[in-house]
Amino acid sequence: MPARISLDVDPPGNGQYFTSKEVLKGRVIVNLEKSTTIKKISVKFFGASEVTVRSDDHNMDGTRRNIQSPPSIGRSFHEIVSQELQVFPPSNVVQAMNGSERAFKVEEGEHDYRFEFKVPKRAKCWRRHRKNSNNIFRGAISNGIPPSFNDRLRKNQISDVGTYLYSLGRVEYRLEAALYYGRSLMWPKPFKSADVAEKRIELIPGDSASRLVGESLTPAVTPATILDSKYVFTLEDGTEAWTEVHADRLKSVYRLDLLFQQGCGKFDKIYVAFSNLETRDTLQLRLVRLQLNLLEFVTYLAGEIGNRNLSSLCLLNIATDLSIDPKTLRQRPDDDVLEAPLNLLGVEALQQFRFNEQDYKHKGNRLFSFTSCNIRREYRFQLFLDFKDENQNVFQTETQTNIVNIFCESITVQENPPPYCIDKSTDTLPVYVT
Ligand SMILES: [Zn+2]
């Protein structure tokens, strides 16, 4: 082999993945065993969002399709980036050549050529969509370019149908360096005109994260969203009860966010509500278990067909023993409903609980929401609360939140900021022991 070509990409600033604020930089390294005639060496920066979907087994009216007829398959490919940079011969030489395709003799040994690519703000397919945007997800374009997704899943890692269907959508970015030989070498190897080196790039733009940081740091001004549990349960005396989460900051959740700590605006205000509670003074109800799941909905779109994949990730499942104090029951001003807050301050595990502390990777993907032209990844939280009465009857409530923007970045500047105190009196001065 006369030449060996490889790509050396400078690592990203955070050591893990590239963001849109960075420039992709690196070197193409060419090792020549002997002097070689080379036409050009170029580096390409590619990015695409692609999905494969299959039509449902049901017709539009809900009847089952004839299983003899094979499901129809749809494919969708959107080009996000396609840039090419010629690193050899240098641009001034190419200009001087005035369009002629000359090859150059390069001496044996190691040669390296630097390259740089800026990450674009908009997907390349964007302009095409402004005319015809019926078959793409709403919001895809305003969100900028999508993050890498499913680009690590390899065929040998797919062991079940669920993972297979999940793997049918992918956002991939890669750099590709190619060395094109001059004519003298083309002759003996007519089918081998170029040597190629490839590197996959993990890119998480993060623009939308920084845009939304402001929202989560400023005090909430809108009234809290009240999320009722899906079903009511009935106590032995016939009273109907349900749970409510009062949340004013559940639009966006960043990694390491505290989810239950007082004042966080997420799951810190949970109420049990009772209609027509006759036995209010003798109420004996305890919260015995709390489970928080993250539900992921990934939808792939091609033409008229959309396929959805659902995953459920258990974030927290703890046994508790939290009595509802009848003294804290209060009547709501405009109806007969009584409500009591769950005193979550008393549960240490909840006060410490941070979202996605372990930086979990679901099927190889970090946890973040995004919308590309043909892929939409969305999240909701699902909260299960188990209660027990004095006769050991167990009642469970389930609450699902609205869609939440999930970010793999953390905006927690300091994990545990030291308390800032001002000495008010000399009492707090250290006491010297004599
Ligand atoms: Zn597109």
Image: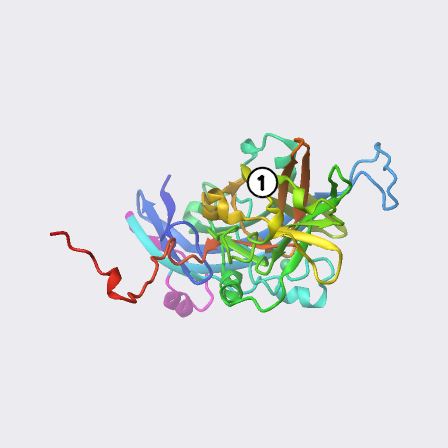
Instruction: Determine whether, in the image, residue 115 is placed left or right of residue 257.
Output: left
Residue located 58% across and 40% down the image:
290
**Relative to 144, 431 lies left or right:** left
Dot 1 surroundings within 10 Å: few (below 14), some, or many (20 or more)?
A: some
Q: Nearer the viewer, residue 41 or 27?
A: 27
Is 212 one of the magenta-colored residues?
no
Of the residues shown, which amino acid type is indicated by label 1? Answer: Leu
Can you tell which quarter of the image residue 414 is in?
bottom left
Please tell me which residue is depicted at 68% across the width and 58% down the height of the picture. Answer: 137
Counting from the top left corner in percent of width and height, residue 121 is at: 52, 65
For the question of whether residue 243 can be seen, the reply is: yes
Query: In the image as oriented, which residue stretches furthest toward the front?
Result: 281
**In the depicted view, which residue is nearer to us: 384 or 204?**
384
Report helix, strand or loop for mark 1: strand
Q: Which quadrant of the figure shows ligand 1?
A: bottom right
Residue 39 drawn at (x, y percent): 42, 55
What is the total number of numbered labels drawn onto the structure image? 1
To which residue does mark 1 refer? Answer: 290
- In magenta stretch: residue 99: yes
Farthest residue, direction left = 434
Q: Position of residue 336 (x, y in %)?
A: 75, 56
Q: Is residue 168 visible?
A: no
- Magenta segment range? 90-109
Could you tell me which residue is drawn at 44 percent across and 50 percent down? 178
